[in-house]
Amino acid sequence: MDKTMHDAAKAALKNAYVTYSNFPVSAALKLKDGTIITGVNIENASYGLTNCAERTALFTAYARGYRKDDIDSILVTTKQNHLVSPCGACRQVMRELMPEDALVTMVDASGNHKIVKNAELLPLGFTKDDL
C-alpha cells in the first residue's frame, strides 16, 4: 500500500460533505508524474445527485487536463472497520477514465487493505469499444 496516498486520503476525509449518511469516503488518485489528487463524497438532498469520492478525484484530474494515460492508481478509504469498494457508478467511470491495469487499493480504518486491478472491479464493463 502506498503510504503517501493513504495519508492524503485520510487527511481529506474531513472534507467530505456527508450531511445525510454520515459516511465519509475519500479517494487519492496518483498520477504518473507523482501528483496526488484527492476527492471526497459530496452529498445532496436529492440523493441521486450525490458524487462519490472516486468520481470527484477523477473529474478533478480531468478538469486539470490529465487523462487516462496519466493515471497510475487510486486509493479509497473510509472510517469503517471493513473494506468498502467503489460503487457501480464509480466502477463504470473508473473503467472508462483509468487504465484497465491501474491499481485500486481499498483501505479500512485499521489500515487493512486489498489491491485489485481496475478492470477486475467491473468485468465485461461497457466501454467506448461497445459503441
Image: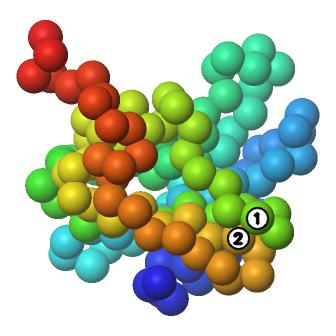
**Residue 53 place in picture, x, y as percent:** 58, 48
Residue that label 1 marks = 82
Q: In this view, does 62 lie to the left or right of 16?
A: left
- Marks 1/2 in contact by CB < 8 Å: the verdict is yes
Asked if one can make out residue 50 in the rendered structure from this viewpoint, the answer is: yes
Circle 2: residue type = Asp
Residue 83 position within the rendered picture, expressed as x and y whole percent measured from the top left = 68, 62
Q: Is residue 55 left or right of residue 100?
A: right
Q: In this view, does 92 lie above or below 36?
A: above
Colour scheme in use: rainbow
* Mark with earlier residue (1, 2): 1
Residue 62 visible somewhere in the drawing: no
Quadrant hosting residue 103? bottom left
Residue at screen point 82% across, 20% down: 45
* Residue in view at x 15 percent, y 22 percent: 128
Measure the C-alpha gap from mark 1 to mark 2: 5 Å
Disc 1 secondary structure class: loop
Q: Which residue is drawn at 28% across and 30% down?
A: 124
State the SS at label 2: loop
Q: In which quarter of the image is the C terminus?
A: top left
Left or right: residue 89 compared with residue 7: left
Residue toward you, 51 or 127: 127
Which amino acid, mark 1? His
| Residue at figure coordinates x 76%, y 74% from the top left | 109
Q: Vertical placement of 46 versus 63: above or below?
A: above
